[in-house]
């Protein structure tokens, strides 16, 4: 009964917010039902290899009102913002036991993912003119395989992804419309992201880079200098506070202070770190189904790991996804992603002279920052876990936006190309739903 109450409340909140923002609600509410179905057969530790560690951190804060000791969990070196909010959720919303504790925390992640979807829709509405294009991009984001997986994970990525996509949205608006409130909203979201997880460095650096770039375009106007100084001081302060708040569990070395226990990965998980690891793409391995994955892999290529993890993460999905139907769907999803990536690359190449790049500069800056820092992270500590797409999950939004816009432009050349592009997107949505939904 408690779970049904939680679902009803979630759908009601989503419907209210979407109607207030004048968004079509059908896609988001339907995707929430898919996520709830997935939650129904997924425990905290499933497809979330360090889920129990995050759960221990939350429980320690909820019970003792202080960060846990180093020996308690591997997640204990992270900044505490997500865990503090989850602990508050535990003490306030989950009191009384109407909803089981672990399910309640998965519900909390589901609400955070709804926040992610709201900002994704705001980005799409600002950059898409045609309603059909917006619907296609929104459906791809909402039903993307890793969206379903991440929607109920008990992990600080849940809050970090929300704050990072919020920063992406406000950076894009500030760069395009030059409104002061958007700049400070982007600054606040970036600072809070730093207090959540080290992936917040990506949006912080993108904001600083754009603020520095605008010095030249505004001929070193006083307001531009002031904003760069404010952003530098505020984000540096947030980064130093995040280091201080890591608590006794944080490693003492500089890498550990900046990145936490990610610097302490056992050498067993290290993989090749040669130039070929970043220049080569193993097509047969990418198209293989998820059951063939080996950890650590014998040969690990960055772009293979990034693309595959954008669908299924870096760990095997477990017994619930074994069997020929799911293997076939996994291969289909991988093939469709490859087709979409090729379509985006070819479309951008052909349309490069007709695109107003200034309109998308904020999104490009944030996406480039995410990819660059993830690449540096993988080079610094070469393990499959450091090429995981979940670290830059908000990059899914510009990718789906680019695909939908390329399909839209293709319609000007050929109706057949347009229909094919839409069919590929809808087929990925259908395959993702078929892969994750269980009828009991």
Image (spheres, helix red, strand yellow):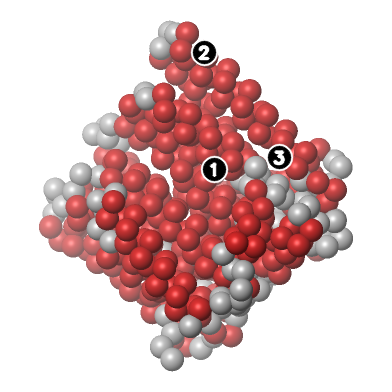
* Label 2 vs 1, first from the N-terminus: 2
Can residue 316 be seen from the camera position used here? no
Q: On the image, numbered disc 2 is attached to which residue?
A: 225
How far is the residue under mark 3 from the one under mark 1? 19 Å
Q: Residue at x 48, y 83 (%)?
A: 1
Classify 362 as above or below 410: above
Q: In the image, is 60 to the left or to the right of 69?
A: left
| Image quadrant in which you'd find residue 200 | top right
Marker disc for residue 370: 1
* Residue 404 percent location from the top left of the image: 28, 52
Q: Would you say 178 lies left or right of 184 here?
A: left
The picture quadrant where one finds residue 191 is top right
Q: Report the Cα–Cα distance between label 2 and label 1.
A: 25 Å
- List x then y, in percent, for residue 430: 33, 74
Local SS, label 3: helix
Q: Residues within 10 Å of mark 1 (few under 14, many from 20)?
A: many
Comparing 83 with 439, the one in front is 83
The extreme bottom residue here reads 440
SS under mark 1:
helix
Name the N-terminal-most of marks 3 and 1.
3
Dot label at residue 311? none
Disc 3 crowd, CA 10 A, few/some/many (<14, 14-19, 20+): many
Number of marks in the image?
A: 3
**Label 3 sits on residue:** 242
Image coords of residue 94 (percent x, y): 59, 68
């Amino acid at each position: 009964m408690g779970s049904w109450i939680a679902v009803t409340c979630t759908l009601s909140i989503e419907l209210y917010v979407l109607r207030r923002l004048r968004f079509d609600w059908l896609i988001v509410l339907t995707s929430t039902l898919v996520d709830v179905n997935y939650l129904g057969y997924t425990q905290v530790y499933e497809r979330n290899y360090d889920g129990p560690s995050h759960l221990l951190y939350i429980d320690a804060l909820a019970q003792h009102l202080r960060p846990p000791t180093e020996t308690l969990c591997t997640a204990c070196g992270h900044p505490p913002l997500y865990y503090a909010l989850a602990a508050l959720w535990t003490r306030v919303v989950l009191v009384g036991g109407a909803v089981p504790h672990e399910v309640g925390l998965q519900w909390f992640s589901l609400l955070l993912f709804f926040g992610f979807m709201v900002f994704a829709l705001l980005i799409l509405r600002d950059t898409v003119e045609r309603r059909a294009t917006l619907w296609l991009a929104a459906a791809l984001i909402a039903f993307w395989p890793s969206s379903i997986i991440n929607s109920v994970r008990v992990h600080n990525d849940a809050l970090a992804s929300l704050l990072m996509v919020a920063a992406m949205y406000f950076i894009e608006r500030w760069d395009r419309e030059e409104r002061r409130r958007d700049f400070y909203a982007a600054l606040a979201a970036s600072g809070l992201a730093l207090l959540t997880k080290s992936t917040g460095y990506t949006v912080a650096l993108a904001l600083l880079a754009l603020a520095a770039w605008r010095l030249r375009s505004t001929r070193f106007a006083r307001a531009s200098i002031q904003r760069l100084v404010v952003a530098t001081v505020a984000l540096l302060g947030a980064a130093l506070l995040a280091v201080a708040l890591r608590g006794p569990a944080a490693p003492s070395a500089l890498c550990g202070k900046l990145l936490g226990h990610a610097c302490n990965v056992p050498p067993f998980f290290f993989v090749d770190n040669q130039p070929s690891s970043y220049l080569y793409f193993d097509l047969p391995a990418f198209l293989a189904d998820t059951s063939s994955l080996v950890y650590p892999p014998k040969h690990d290529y960055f772009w293979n790991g990034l693309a595959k993890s954008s669908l299924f993460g870096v760990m095997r999905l477990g017994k619930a996804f074994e069997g020929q139907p799911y293997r076939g769907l996994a291969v289909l999803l991988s093939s469709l992603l490859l087709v979409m990536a090729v379509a985006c690359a070819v479309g951008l190449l052909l349309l490069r002279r007709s695109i107003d790049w200034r309109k998308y500069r904020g999104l490009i800056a944030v996406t480039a920052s995410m990819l660059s820092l993830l690449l540096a992270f993988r080079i610094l500590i070469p393990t499959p876990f450091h090429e995981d797409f979940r670290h830059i999950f908000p990059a899914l939004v510009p990718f789906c936006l680019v695909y939908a816009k390329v399909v839209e432009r293709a319609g000007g050349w050929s109706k057949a190309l347009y229909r094919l592009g839409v069919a590929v997107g809808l087929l990925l949505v259908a395959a993702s739903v078929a892969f994750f939904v269980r009828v009991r």
